[in-house]
Image: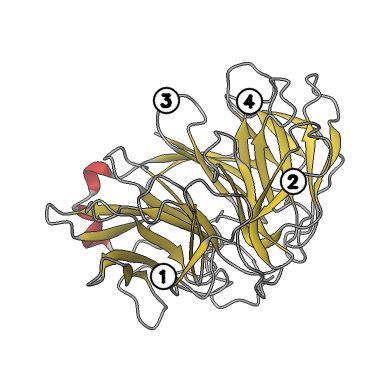
Amino acid sequence: MLSRLLLLSPALLLCVGSLAAEEATQPMFEKTRLTEEYFAEGASVGDFNKDGKTDIVCGPHWFAGPDFQTKHTFYDGKAFPNDRGYSDNFFSFVSDFNGDGFDDVLVVGLPGTPAHWYENSQSGDTWKKHFAFPAVDNEAPTFLDITGDGKPELICHFEGQLGYAKPSEKDPTQRWVWTPISEKQGWGRYQHGLGVGDVNGDGRQDFLMPEGWWEQPENWDGTTPWKKHAYRFAPGGAGIHAYDLDGDGDNDVVTSLHGHKYGLVWHEQTKGENGEIQFTEHEIMGTPDKSVSDLVFSQLHAVEMADMNGDGLKDIVTGKCYWAHNGHDPGAKDPAVLVIFQTNRSDKGEVSFTPIVLDDNSGTGRQITLDDVNGDEKVDIVAGNKKGTFVFKAK
């Protein structure tokens, strides 16, 4: 294994002046490369052997914590070429689907293909595979509790409708139950961008897409479509997040503009004359020709948020999805960076971002996971992609 301490990548650090003021709160990370092979476009975490330690899952393998040196294979998978094609594993989501007390793994493959979950064998042997859902559309599905019942749901679109799927309460080994929340629209399997968050502050989770947000009604009857509020957040990038960046009490929206091009923005929530929700777009990172940030990279196919430096504000974690279209995207041959856009907020609520390059030879894939993998109460980063499988542990 290769390990090294990382703060900044000198070759890519182009904004030295602005970073100097933030030096006291810059996060440091130790990089560990678990594999060099390409198994999946994402990675996640769980406690698969119930030893109280966090483990990492990527593709057909899980790596036992706390050092992740021991690799277990739970299904018959293979490594894919690093320079062409795609894995059949894009996302791994972890939960106890059958209620036996052990973490299982839900695997989502290429957009539009079936999802399956693997039942933890409790012994380290090959896990039993169960069919979950016939087709997970969208290139940024997520696994969050949108209903408020305390259990996460698989959130995507299917047959032209937004919605969520969850295991049958009677028999989790049967096809998962699909609940649509929208009218049918022309969303294709490769639609980019999706998120969940409380946009209007009513305590209920709403559904976010590049062209607007769908308001979850109170005491929903389970059939009436949620109200759509049209607004163009992006052409379509990655995960979309609702978070109060400016500290004014309402949630703003963060998203990348393109999963295969350039652009990262936040939309400041404002109010119209009649109190209706409106947004004002602010650029965080633009294109090589024009950008408020000196650091510019493309292929922002995974975007997550967490407080990475302990200052109480969520930061943006993203990077290049290495070889997302096998070298055909703008900027595809630039370094595979992993970046934190550190959130700065003045006493007046003015928001700015400090880009911190953690690494230039890993990137993000379609899924990155932010979690405390070693129990030190600091947020770590887990990623899988064409460069391999990685964990960045906060120091």
Give the residue at mark 2.
177
Q: Nearer the viewer, residue 230 or 308?
A: 230
Residue 129, numbered label: none
Residue drawn at x 43%, y 40% is 29
Q: Nearer the viewer, residue 389 or 142?
A: 142
Give the residue at mark 4.
47
The residue type indicated by label 2 comes to: Val
Q: Position of residue 253 (x, y in %)?
A: 39, 60
Sequence-wise, the earlier of marks 2 and 4 is 4
The residue type indicated by label 4 comes to: Asp
Sequence-wise, the earlier of marks 4 and 3 is 4
How far, Cα to Cα, is label 4 from label 3?
Answer: 16 Å
Q: Residues within 10 Å of mark 4 (few under 14, many from 20)?
A: many
Residue drawn at x 26%, y 65% is 275
Q: Looking at the rendering, which quadrant does residue 12 occupy? A: bottom left
Sequence-wise, the earlier of marks 3 and 2 is 2
How far, Cα to Cα, is label 2 from label 1?
Answer: 42 Å
Label 1 residue SS? loop
Q: Are the two marked residues, 3 and 2, in contact with CB atoms closer than 8 angstroms? A: no
Give the residue at mark 1.
296
Q: Depth-wise, is mark 3 or mark 2 nearer the camera?
A: 2
Q: How many marks do you count on the picture?
A: 4
The residue type indicated by label 1 comes to: Val
